[in-house]
Amino acid sequence: EDKVVQSPLSLVVHEGDTVTLNCSYEVTNFRSLLWYKQEKKAPTFLFMLTSSGIEKKSGRLSSILDKKELSSILNITATQTGDSAIYLCAVVPPERAGNNRKLIWGLGTSLAVNP
Amino acid sequence: DADVTQTPRNRITKTGKRIMLECSQTKGHDRMYWYRQDPGLGLRLIYYSFDVKDINKGEISDGYSVSRQAQAKFSLSLESAIPNQTALYFCATSDPRDRGRNEQFFGPGTRLTVL
């Protein structure tokens, strides 16, 4: 069964710390992996990663996928209180009968950044 | 203006009542989804629709029904609400022509409490 596991489930850090969030997947021949940030509202898109291994960056956030390890990490440097959120990972499976390429979601990592 | 809107934003109801949650989008996307989010369980797909004539069950469709009235509107109904349907409900859209990004755009959520 296709599965996405995120770790840690929760994390508390101080402003200025660097954090690394992990997303592991067991999805054969996956197509892409997506990271979302959810504050006190709807999830918003951060990055899409593919098996090309190209790192994506946006300000203090960066993410890369390791095809061999079947995982992706999301790094946040010089954390700020505004980074406090749940970070969700989702994998797009290959198109096969019955799945219509629905996203497979992890449970998320809850990050709290204290001043 | 928000691209994906949900009404109501909050609702408290009693066991046995029929409830309808509505979702509208101005993004012109064909694909629409209903999720529920519960603490510790992540996002779970209830129903999804790839066009006006297409309705598909997700992981947890029991106790729910949907209606795709138009490309822009996708409603979720709880025929007879029960307390374990208390959750945060999200509507989302996606564009199959998004060149493989598979990004989903979420509405602001409806917090439903069933007493």
Image (cartoon, rainbow, N blue to C red):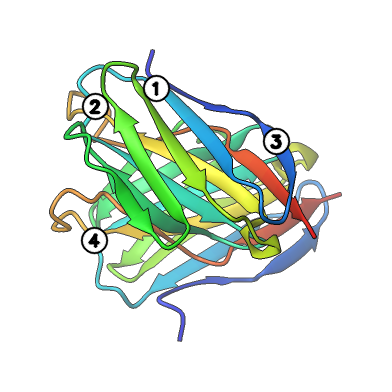
**Kind of residue at badge 4:** Asp
**Kind of residue at badge 1:** Tyr
Q: Are marks 3 and 2 on the same chain?
A: yes
Residue that appears at 24% across and 72% down? B28
Query: Is residue A10 left or right of A61 when viewed as pictured?
Result: right
Q: Farthest residue in the bottom direction?
A: B1
Separation (CA) of disc 4 from disc 3: 35 Å
The local crowd at label 3, few if under 14, some if 14 to 19, many if 20 or more residues have their Cα within 10 Å, is some
The local crowd at label 4, few if under 14, some if 14 to 19, many if 20 or more residues have their Cα within 10 Å, is some
In the rendering, which numbered label is found on residue A25? 1
Separation (CA) of disc 1 from disc 2: 9 Å
Ranked by sequence position, the earlier of labels 3 and 2 is: 3
Secondary structure beneath dot 1 equals strand
* Image location (x, y in percent) of residue B9: 66, 70
Residue bearing the label numbered 3: A10
Asked if labels 2 and 1 touch by Cβ distance under 8 angstroms, the answer is: yes
* Image location (x, y in percent) of residue A69: 34, 17
The local crowd at label 2, few if under 14, some if 14 to 19, many if 20 or more residues have their Cα within 10 Å, is some
Front tag of 4 and 3: 3
In the rendering, which numbered label is found on residue A30? 2
Is residue B92 at all visible to an observer of this figure?
A: yes
Separation (CA) of disc 4 from disc 1: 28 Å
Q: Chain of mark 3?
A: A
Residue bearing the label numbered 4: B30
The local crowd at label 1, few if under 14, some if 14 to 19, many if 20 or more residues have their Cα within 10 Å, is many
